[in-house]
């Protein structure tokens, strides 16, 4: 298959564990360019994985535990009593973020009117010629800001905006290699307004964005995304229901 026949496809769907950036050809299979790295399904294992990032992360966790003991306890209890494993769906990651931030209804409403956010860390890592988006630094970054008393309304906004910028910048690099200037979106987060704005900031200016299919229209006040045509009372940065169970992404790509 010739690279010239490929479409640069970004699939961002909460419940699809195979979401990521692909070179999509007229005939399958898609060629993965960037996938989401899995997180442990157990809360204690998630905390251990974050603490193992570096010395700063190791110091952060006990500080966070002293400052927010109830949040830390809720994080530890994720997946309690269930078999250990890994989960790479965006829903699980966003649910962990929801627990870690403990945002309230008022924070969610305020997030919809935030005009600019903070840079939240994401990491691009390569394993066996495959690139992955590592979200462990993301959680560490969110907790650092929470310890610094950043308003809760700013953090969900920043989470999606920085995700869009990181994905957009990586897609821009891949577009240069494939000689593509269009990014096709699919999945139920394709219409998320904050993620979309972040993509536009991260992509080279010459890039265009098109949507492959309409996103799902169901959304509740307890879901971190509000994709597709949203009801008038829904918010673009509301947290999801809690689960039952190195390279920093660039902030902007210049085109």
Image (spheres, helix red, strand yellow):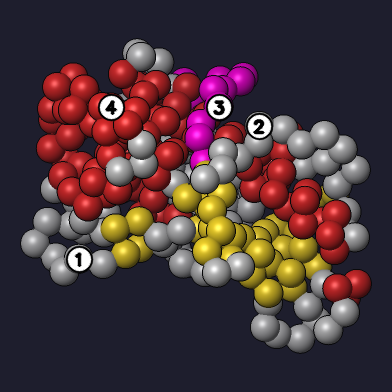
Q: Which residue is mark 1?
A: 84
Magenta region, residue range: 110-122
Callout 2 environment at 10 Å: few (<14), some (14 to 19), or many (20+)? some
Which-is-in-front pick, marks 2 and 4?
A: 4
Which-is-in-front pick, marks 3 and 4?
A: 4
* Quadrant of the drawing holding the N terminus: bottom right
Residue 31 lies in magenta, yes or no? Answer: no
Whichever of labels 4 and 1 marks the residue nearer the N terminus, that label is 4
The label on residue 119 is 3
Local secondary structure at mark 4: helix
Marks 2/3: CA distance? 7 Å
Residue 115 lies in magenta, yes or no? Answer: yes
Local secondary structure at mark 1: loop
Callout 4 environment at 10 Å: few (<14), some (14 to 19), or many (20+)? some
Whichever of labels 2 and 1 marks the residue nearer the N terminus, that label is 1
Whichever of labels 2 and 3 marks the residue nearer the N terminus, that label is 3
Q: Residue at x 61, y 20 (%)?
A: 116
The label on residue 60 is 4
Marks 2/4: CA distance? 23 Å
- Main SS of the magenta segment? loop
Is the residue 3 above or below the residue 145 in the image?
A: below
């Amino acid at each position: 298959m010739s690279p010239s026949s490929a479409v640069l496809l970004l699939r961002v769907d909460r419940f699809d564990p195979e979401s990521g950036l692909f070179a999509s050809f007229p005939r399958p299979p898609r060629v993965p360019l960037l996938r989401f790295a899995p997180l442990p399904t157990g809360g204690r294992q998630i905390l251990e994985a974050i603490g193992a990032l570096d010395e700063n992360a190791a110091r952060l966790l006990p500080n966070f535990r002293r400052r927010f003991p109830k949040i830390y306890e809720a994080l530890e209890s994720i997946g309690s009593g269930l078999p250990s494993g890994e989960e790479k769906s965006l829903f699980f990651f966003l649910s962990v973020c929801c627990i870690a931030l403990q945002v309230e209804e008022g924070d969610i409403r305020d997030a919809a009117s935030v005009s600019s956010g903070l840079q939240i860390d994401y990491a691009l890592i390569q394993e066996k010629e495959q690139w992955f988006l590592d979200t462990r630094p993301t959680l560490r970054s969110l907790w650092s800001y929470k310890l610094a008393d950043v308003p809760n309304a700013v953090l969900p906004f920043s989470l999606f905006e920085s995700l869009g910028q990181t994905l957009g910048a990586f897609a821009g690099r891949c577009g240069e290699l494939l000689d593509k200037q269009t990014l096709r979106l699919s999945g139920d987060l394709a219409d998320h307004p904050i993620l979309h704005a972040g993509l536009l900031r991260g992509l080279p200016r010459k890039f265009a964005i098109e949507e492959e299919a309409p996103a799902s229209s169901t959304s509740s006040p307890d879901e971190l995304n509000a994709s597709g045509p949203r009801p008038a009372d829904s918010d673009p940065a509301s947290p999801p229901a809690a689960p039952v169970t190195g390279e920093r992404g660039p902030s902007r790509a210049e085109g």
